[in-house]
Image (cartoon, rainbow, N blue to C red):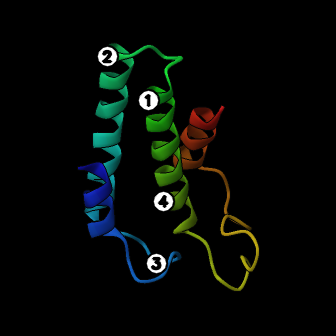
Amino acid sequence: MARNKDAEGRRSHWYMRGGQERKMASEIYSVAQMISERIYTNKAIQFVETLKESAEQLESIHCEAGKPEYSRWNKAASIPDNDFSNEARYKYT
């Protein structure tokens, strides 16, 4: 469900701001994390996959503030850290 909402909110280019659907997808990912942690454990591969997918989504939201001329190799180049990047980094670790 979160993947579908996220896809609805994406724009044709990675550097264009997404719609409200992306915020809804982030909330759904958070709920999915809590559920998967309760069903499995925080060491289970299913929980880790949920964290990874959620982190990738947050990272892509962070990259929407970028400019293609700065980001030839790195979509997050010249974008200051924000809540999305900090949370994504936390989930990756």
The residue beneath circle 3 is 16
Mark 4 crowd level (few <14, some 14–19, many ≥20, 10 Å Cα): many
Numbered disc 4: secondary structure: helix
- Is disc 1 in contact with disc 2, using a CB cutoff of under 8 Å? yes
Could you tell which of marks 4 and 1 lies nearer the N-terminus?
A: 1
In the displayed structure image, the side of residue 43 where residue 92 appears, left or right: right
Q: Residues within 10 Å of mark 1 (few under 14, many from 20)?
A: some
Q: Which residue is mark 1?
A: 46
Looking at this view, is 65 or 58 the one in front? Answer: 58
Q: Earlier in the sequence, mark 2 or mark 3?
A: 3
Q: Mark 4 vs mark 2: which is more N-terminal?
A: 2
Q: Evaluate if marks 4 and 2 touch, with contact meaning CB atoms under 8 Å apart.
A: no
Inter-mark Cα distance, 2 to 3:
36 Å
In the image, residue 49 sits, relative to residue 1, either above or below, namely above
Q: Position of residue 9 (x, y in %)?
A: 30, 67
Measured as percent of width and height from the top left, residue 90 is found at: 61, 33
What type is the residue that disc 3 sits on? Met
Asked which quadrant contains residue 89, the reply is: top right
Judging depth in this view, the residue of 82 and 13 nearest the camera is 13
> Looking at the picture, which amino acid does disc 2 mark?
Ile
What is the spatial separation of the Cα atoms under label 3 and label 4, in whole angstroms?
A: 10 Å
Q: Nearer the viewer, mark 1 or mark 3?
A: 1
- What's the distance in space between the residues labelled 1 and 2, CA to CA? 10 Å
Q: Disc 2 on helix, strand or loop? A: helix
Picture disc at residue 61: 4
Residue at the spot 33% in from the left edge and 14% down from the top edge? 38
Pointer 2: what residue? 39
Of the two numbered discs 1 and 2 on the same chain, state the one appearing first in sequence.
2
For label 3, the crowd category at 10 Å Cα-Cα, with few meaning under 14, some 14 to 19 and many 20 or more, is some
Q: Earlier in the sequence, mark 1 or mark 3?
A: 3
For mark 1, give the secondary structure: helix
The amino acid marked with disc number 1 is Gln
